[in-house]
Image (cartoon, helix red, strand yellow):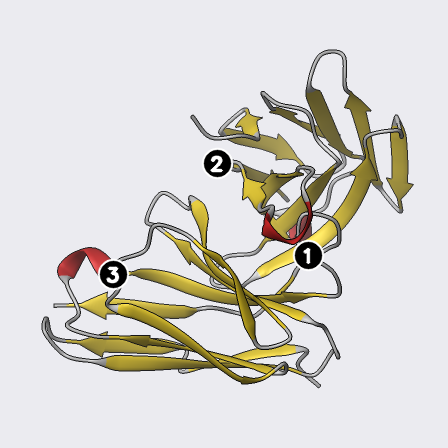
Amino acid sequence: DTAVSQTPKYLVTQMGNDKSIKCEQNLGHDTMYWYKQDSKKFLKIMFSYNNKELIINETVPNRFSPKSPDKAHLNLHINSLELGDSAVYFCASSQEGGWNSPLHFGNGTRLTVT
Amino acid sequence: SQQGEEDPQALSIQEGENATMNCSYKTSINNLQWYRQNSGRGLVHLILIRSNEREKHSGRLRVTLDTSKKSSSLLITASRAADTASYFCAKGGYGGATNKLIFGTGTLLAVQP
């Protein structure tokens, strides 16, 4: 069974559209994250949730809105997509805060905005 | 600037050889973690080493940490073609839940069969 699963794997859309990425973890972890990996493979945290509460909100445009309906799910909704949003988005989870325990990553969603 | 910078950026070796990747950081850490990323996949955690530890092993992997030099190294012994991947170090700081795990820029390792 996949521990951290995110869908879709690929997302191709036009500028201005709104899209969502879903993430679920079956590890029983308390903390979930969204990371963005750019074309140079640089990985940057976007959001962190602990037990459905927002803990970390990096300087991300407010077009990005995470939602955690329960501690096993963390979805990412993106409004008014821009070309610069093209990247691979990774969901991850950890037992404690990620600064102190290993992260478990999903396989990513490659978003291409045309 | 970013914490957790890897060196070299790319490394190409033959199967059976050892591969060493280095990671430097700037501020104090609680722990340092190493991850592997295969092409088109998510990152996989390899080893977590705490600031009071100097060395950890896991199979063919050996991680060292030198807090005085603010550096860590990952050694893969007897490399295999399947070790071809990007390797990232990530720094875990102090400060509780709002602290972030900061990833470096990665080393791309190519193991030639």
- Count of numbered circles on the image: 3
Other-residue count near label 2 (Cα within 10 Å), few / some / many at <14 / 14–19 / ≥20:
many
Which residue occupies the extreme top position in the image?
A: B69
Which residue is at the front of the view, B2 or A2?
B2
Tell which tag, 3 or 1, sits nearer the viewer. Answer: 1
Instruction: Give yes or no for contact between labels 1 and 2 (Cβ–Cβ under 8 Å).
Output: no
Which residue is at the front of the view, B36 or A76?
A76
Q: Secondary structure at mark 2?
A: loop
| B52 displayed left or right of A12 | right
Which residue is labeled 3 in the image? A86
Residue A24 image offset from top left, x and y in percent: 57, 83
Q: CA distance from mark 3 to mark 2?
A: 19 Å
Q: CA distance from mark 1 to mark 2?
A: 22 Å
Mark 1 — on which chain does it sit? A
Residue kind at label 3, given as amino acid type? Ser
Residue kind at label 1, given as amino acid type? Gly
Residue B111 image offset from top left, x and y in percent: 62, 41
The label number, if any, that marks residue A97 in the structure image:
1
Mark 2 — on which chain does it sit? B
Q: Secondary structure at mark 3?
A: loop
Q: Is residue B72 above or below residue B36?
A: above
Q: Earlier in the sequence, mark 3 or mark 1?
A: 3
Residue at coordinates 78% horizontally, 46% vertically from top-left? B47
Residue at coordinates 79% horizontally, 25% vertically from top-left? B65
| Quadrant where the N terminus of chain A is found in the figure | bottom right
Which residue is labeled 2 in the image? B105
Residue B88 image offset from top left, x and y in percent: 59, 41
Residue kind at label 2, given as amino acid type? Thr
Residue at coordinates 61% horizontally, 23% vertically from top-left? B27
Q: Is residue B52 above or below residue A46?
A: above
